[in-house]
Amino acid sequence: MAVKDTNGHVSSTSGVSGSNGCAKDLASEGFLPSFKPLYQGPKDKDKNWTWLDKEPEDVAEAAENEETAQHALITRLQKANDSRKKFEIHSIIIQSPWLKEALGEILKNYPGVCCQLKRLVFEAPFEPFVHRWSEFQEFRRRKDIDVMTAEHLELLHDVLKEELKEVIKTLEDYVVHGVTTWEHVWTIFQPGQVIYSDSLHGAPSALRLRSGKYVKLQCGQAYQLTAETIDWTGNHFGRSIERINIFEFLGTTRILGLAAFPMSFHPFKAKAKDILINRGRKFEDLAGCHYKEYKGFAVTWDKDGNEVLTSVSGRIIVDSDTFRRFSPRYEGAPEPECAAKSFNVDNQSDDEYVFGKQQEKKRLHLTEEHQLICCPRVRGYSLKKKQWLLFYLDLIKDIKFNDNAFESLVLPEDQKELILSFAESQAMNRSNFDDVISGKGRGHITLLSGPPGVGKTLTAESVAEHMHAPLYMMSAGDLGINPDQVETKLTNILEMIAKWNAVLLLDECDVFLEERSAHDLERNKLVSIFLRVLEYYEGILFLTTNRVDNIDAAFQSRIHVSMSYPDLNNESRRHIWENFLQLLDRPEDFSGKDVDELAKVQLNGRQIKNVLKSASLLSTRKNEPLTRKYVDMVLAIERRRPGVAPGF
């Protein structure tokens, strides 16, 4: 049967039976296969729109129709705010296929512009044309373009030139004089270009601009630049988003004085690019896990999460992956969709060298374009400060290892050989010994006992130096005394150390290894935690204690080597004096008799170092070389100290 809608439209349908076999009523709600248009009317007293079933009579015909579709472009005009003209262009609609093809080349890679669209609209203030005006002019002058394209380009040029002449003239004038105004600051920032900032992150940086816009912040009006840098997540390279604010200013200001400016304005652009590309290569080389030296300021965070500088000196671990997992201040990772595979990079690949056991997977290299905009900082860990920090690339250096450190140890040769054999076999993973349970008891634990200052800590330090491996020094203060916190912190530390293939030193281990009793349940928990966790530790562990007799018997069975350090004798003290004098480059100022006499003073190794350090400060203040008299002066002062042992 045929049915009509209320406007007289005809459609057909057939009788339809419901589940009960009866024909449905054609007037049932939602049954007719047709539509009914309603038109927006005036608002009612509650300011809600009303809807009419008939078209209002005062509505004008649509402006765009078959006639307007024939034109190469359409300009939509609005009332001008400028008193010098009646109308100004609100937007331009590009309809010419020849223009679209030409603009596809002129505006190539301009963010947010796709010239293949059927309806291509540009709105005032026409940023793409302002930023690409020179490219537009150059394309117009080409001799190889066809007549239709040239004609349509001239048409668009005439429209834009009239509309943008003041902006273009102002931009050219500003560029010549190296200045800009707040109103026109947007004209010098072209999306997709490389910009330069010497204030972002406290180091000179290059970034690729994504966009810019005027925003209102708590500090006032700003032109906000959204840009990207190349960062390393710990697994892949990606793009990290940065925002730079140029706050409102009066009159004109130097372009080079802005918080950021296009790299093309840099007075030494070629040199700056070379420096940044070389730093980018260093950034790429440090992707992964690396053991390095650092001296200078690094970045930490205050309680509110704001970046603050802290002074760092010593060995560091560069490791973004472990930073991401364990740092309490981990910031967002680079965009995951921008992994290395999405970069336009070459196909060469190498095995990434990483200290220790682990090797990074092969990865693609960055191009110079990406190296130019790499981050100026890397994430890592300071072994001395025991903090997760951000380190400036320019301050990271290779470590100059002291390969004679182990030789200077005052130990019997057989003990030194035994310690080295354990350490080297563990480092090279040559040991085939294992427990009945796989992975259990594969670590090497050495207990060093004896009085203070006889070389226990120095032994662990020397082994790590000999192996060119990090030394992680752990004490009771790093773990606390709460059993639950101790287990979590200890597990995390051992996981970090395993990745870094570091040597672990548990200094003054008595508090955790003391013999269990029936009365102190909390201490028993701590000892049990250490027993369980260390059972599966696969690295090198040095334990030092002054009270070896108090260690729980369960630990004794887990210790591979136990060494007792006796008090120093005259010969060992003489060796220590000679070693420290050698480090000070002053051996010629001390005769053999001087060293023999000093060796008779009842000092341990730490005290000898402190005496020489104090004597060196005295001699420096007097602007004289370090000699025996300054050492005697320090010793005389120390002897007057209460509680000094006889023979000091």
Image: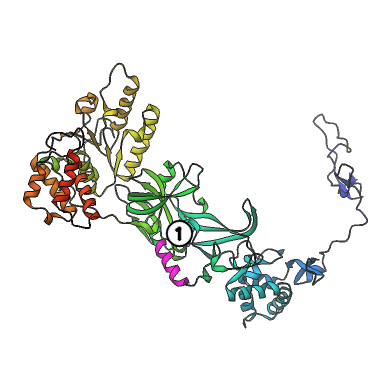
> Considering the numbered disc 1 on the image, is that residue within a helix, a strand or a loop?
loop
Q: Is residue 480 above or below residue 630?
A: above
* Quarter of the figure with the C terminus: top left
Residue lying at the far left in this picture: please name it.
593
Q: Nearer the viewer, residue 458 or 513?
A: 458
In the figure, residue 324 lies in which quadrant? top left
- Residue 172 pos. (x, y %): 62, 75
Q: Residue at x 50, y 55 (%)?
A: 239
- Residue 306 pos. (x, y %): 50, 47
Residue lying at the far right in this picture: please name it.
57
Q: Is residue 351 in view?
A: yes
Q: How is the image coloured?
A: rainbow
Q: Nearer the viewer, residue 598 or 471?
A: 598
* Quarter of the figure with the N terminus: top right
The rendered magenta stretch, by its main secondary structure, is classed as helix
User: Mark 1 — residue?
Assistant: 203
Q: Amino acid at mark 1?
A: Ala
Q: Nearer the viewer, residue 70 or 517?
A: 517
Q: Is residue 454 in view?
A: no
Q: Nearer the viewer, residue 600 or 56?
A: 600
Residue lying at the far bottom in this picture: please name it.
143
Q: In this image, 387 relative to 97: left or right?
A: left
**Which residues are the magenta region?**
268-279
- Residue 141 pos. (x, y %): 63, 81
- Residue 297 pos. (x, y %): 40, 53
Binning the other alpha carbons within 10 Å of mark 1 as few (below 14), some (14 to 19) or many (20 upward) gives: some
Q: Residue at x 92, y 57 (%)?
A: 58
